[in-house]
Amino acid sequence: MSKAALLLLALTISASPGLAQAAVLYQPQAANQRRKEAPAATQCRPGVAGVLFLGGLAYATKSTAPLRLLPTCQGEPQEVRRKPQMLEVRKQTPERRLAKLPAAEALREARLLYIRPRSSWFNSEKLERELLKRKEFGEMGLEITRSANFADLILEITRKRFTTRFTCSIIEPGSERVLAGTTASSLGGEIEPHLADAILKQFKAVRAKPAAEEKK
């Protein structure tokens, strides 16, 4: 190796301690073995300083051998492929199978319910327990979800100010339609049991209609 090459090598390595790794990589007899053993995170290009070092070494030695180390990054193509897939998953919207159905039919076909409280005077977890412990709730095939993204219907609970009256609006999230509404009062006890009874009464009334009509 010429004096110019040695001088360039010494100056470049002293300018950046991190270039020592790039210098070690330039060993033709061990290059292939190091590429196999190095993890994906370290099998990348040596950065700007490393590129300058390898380029200067190639110029000084009049050889293209150092430049062959540049396209050794195996981690980058995998990352490029993963990012679009992650974006596609994020862009996916949940299927709203009830969005185009009439209100009565959507109430009959619904299965997953999400409780959305709009009042601090109301406990959604208590309402969940009240609904789940009622036999009619399970017999109608209804369930409760904690994610609005997967809900067929949303039970939005509000309270009229300075009163004991609560309102439950049954909303189809895909079209934002209010399919039905019911009210209950907390007078004489907690509101959650009264709301559970009112909500089940609403669903039972709609789901009983087809059977009654068939009998006629």
Image (cartoon, grey):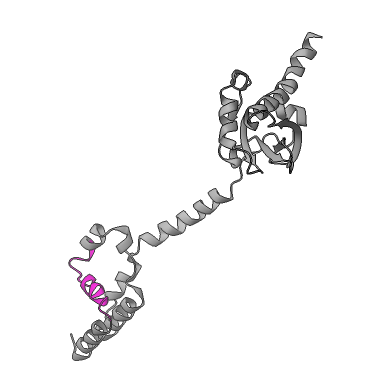
- Residue lying furthest right: 216
Residue 82: image location, x then y, percent? 46, 54
The quadrant of the rendering that contains the N terminus is bottom left
Q: Residue at x 21, y 85 (%)?
A: 10
Extreme-top residue of the structure: 215
Depth check, front residue: 180 or 186:
186
Residue at point 59% right, 18% down? 135
The magenta stretch is 16-32
Q: Position of residue 42 (x, y in %)?
A: 30, 63
Magenta span includes 51: no
Looking at the picture, how far across and down is residue 86, in whole percent? Answer: 50, 52
The answer to which image quadrant residue 76 occupies is bottom left
> Which quadrant is home to the C terminus?
top right
Q: Is residue 2 left or right of residue 160?
A: left
Q: Is residue 5 above or below residue 172?
A: below
Q: Tell which of 144 and 216 is nearer to you.
A: 144
